[in-house]
Amino acid sequence: MRYIRPVSPTPDDWSTRHSVLTTARRTADLVNTLAADHPEPADVADVLRAYGESDPIDLSARDLTEMRAAAAGLREVFATEDTDTAASALNRLLREHTGPLRLSSHDGTTPWHPHLDRADDAPWAEWFLASSCMALTVLVWDRQRPPGGTCDSPSCGHVYVSQGSGPPRRYCSRRCATRERVAAHRRARAAQEPN
């Protein structure tokens, strides 16, 4: 799979594996993986494992269908160009698809943390959408700008999470940025050459 950044915290570093930024990155990687024409359950499970979910991850065809629908809604948040639109998209997802905010320790197996899904044993799609909305909401709140974007490369379309300050990011990876820069250079050079 392309552009999945493995998370490599120490096994007992729960807070790093479940930070807002890590959850937002997991969201982007799942949205990209689920955008494939026919995502394989193993590919989706690999992303979940890379972000700290434990084995076995058993995803059914129904889980994938529902997760793809959730990913489509989350893609709308990444595609927004301004903070107001990002907040509106998140508010709609929160209103239509999540439960009330609650704290969970998964029966004492994890530190206490917030959840927006309706139960600790919620279906994968509900958990994915709720935890993703939580992370993206906190990023909008904290940064007062959209949480990410969609790659400007016409051959890509992946979503990404924006980081830090500085000029707005346009591409999901250095690979896409370089490919587009080289293509623009070649077009400019071809336009200058006599026929």
Image: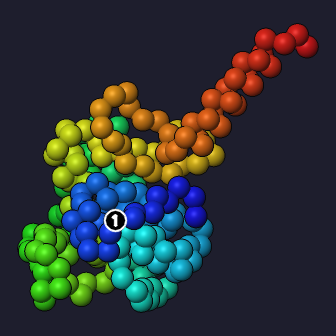
The amino acid type, in three-letter code, at marker 1 is Pro
Q: Where does residue 52 sit, x and y in percent of width and height?
A: 35, 73
| Place of residue 1 in the rendered image (x, y in percent of width and height, measured from the top left) | 58, 64
What percent of the width, then of the height, locates residue 125? 34, 76
Vertically, is 175 above or below 90?
A: above
Camera-side residue: 48 or 153?
48
Q: In the figure, 51 relative to 62: above or below?
A: above
Q: Is residue 33 above or below residue 177?
A: below
Q: Is residue 192 left or right of residue 36?
A: right
67 with respect to 42 (left or right):
left
Q: Residue at x 17, y 80 (%)?
A: 110
Nearer the observer, 97 or 157 = 157
Left or right: 131 in relation to 39 = left
**Residue denoted by label 1:** 9
Quarter-of-image position of residue 70: bottom left
Q: Quadrant of the C terminus?
A: top right
What residue is at 24 percent from the left and 87 percent from the top?
121
Work out whether residue 94 or residue 46 is closer to the camera in this orientation and state it.
46
Image point (35%, 77%), residue name: 53
Residue 81 on image: x %, y % = 35, 37
Taking the image as drawn, is residue 167 in sight?
yes
Residue drawn at 77 percent across, 17 percent down: 189
